[in-house]
Image (tube, rainbow, N blue to C red):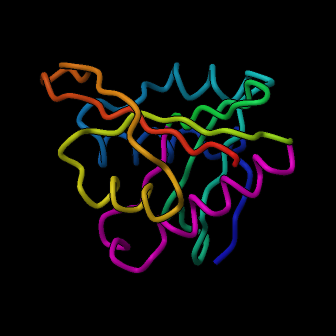
Amino acid sequence: MEFRKWSESDRLELFQLEKDIFSDSWSLYAIDESMGCPAFVGYSLIDNGEIIGYYGFYAIMPEGHIANIAVVEKYRGKNLGFALLSHLIQMGDEREITDYTLEVRAGNVPALNLYKRLGFQQEGLRKKYYGDGEDAVIMWRRKK
């Protein structure tokens, strides 16, 4: 397995994975716009030429806003979310990001546990944030 920076050739595969994984997925336009933004950092986790997980964040100095992180369903339960988030933090640290923030579905217990495992703490709640009315937990990982 290896990490690879997002490229133009990945955009359609990323778009399809977004649709397969999330009910409120990014559009192809959103992927293209993010990839064209100088503050955006996106990496995929590749296994045998296939994207099996990915993440994207915005480096808005000195903060990093995590926009998405996902593992393809058949690869879940193999600690790949931890590998992705650890790599994201490493890439952010190289850019001198001190604090990270994200929103996550209140009902996404595996994701909440992953973020807590890597030092994120809940600092707020966005009521009915998602299109289906589910709340979003606002989490931060602050440098001590």
Name the quadrant of the N terminus.
bottom right
- Residue 60 location, x and y as percent? 73, 24
Residue 62, compared with residue 7, is above or below; it is above
Name the residue located 33 percent from the left edge and 77 percent from the top edge: 77
Name the residue located 78 percent from the left edge and 30 percent from the top edge: 62
Q: Pick the residue in front: 3 or 14.
A: 3
Name the residue located 38 percent from the left edge and 40 percent from the top edge: 122
Tell whether position 9 is magenta: no
Magenta stretch mostly in which secondary structure? helix
Q: Is residue 11 left or right of residue 106?
A: right
- Residue 102 location, x and y as percent? 48, 35
Q: Is residue 79 left or right of residue 74?
A: right
- Residue 59 location, x and y as percent? 73, 31
Q: Pick the residue in front: 143 or 66.
A: 143
- Res 44 → quadrant: bottom right
Residue 119, compared with residue 144, is above or below; it is below
Q: Pick the residue in front: 20 or 53.
A: 53
Q: What span is in magenta?
A: 68-95
Tell whether position 84 is magenta: yes
Residue 29, compared with residue 135, is above or below; it is above
Q: Is residue 81 left or right of residue 144?
A: left
- Residue 48 location, x and y as percent? 59, 78
- Res 138 → quadrant: top left
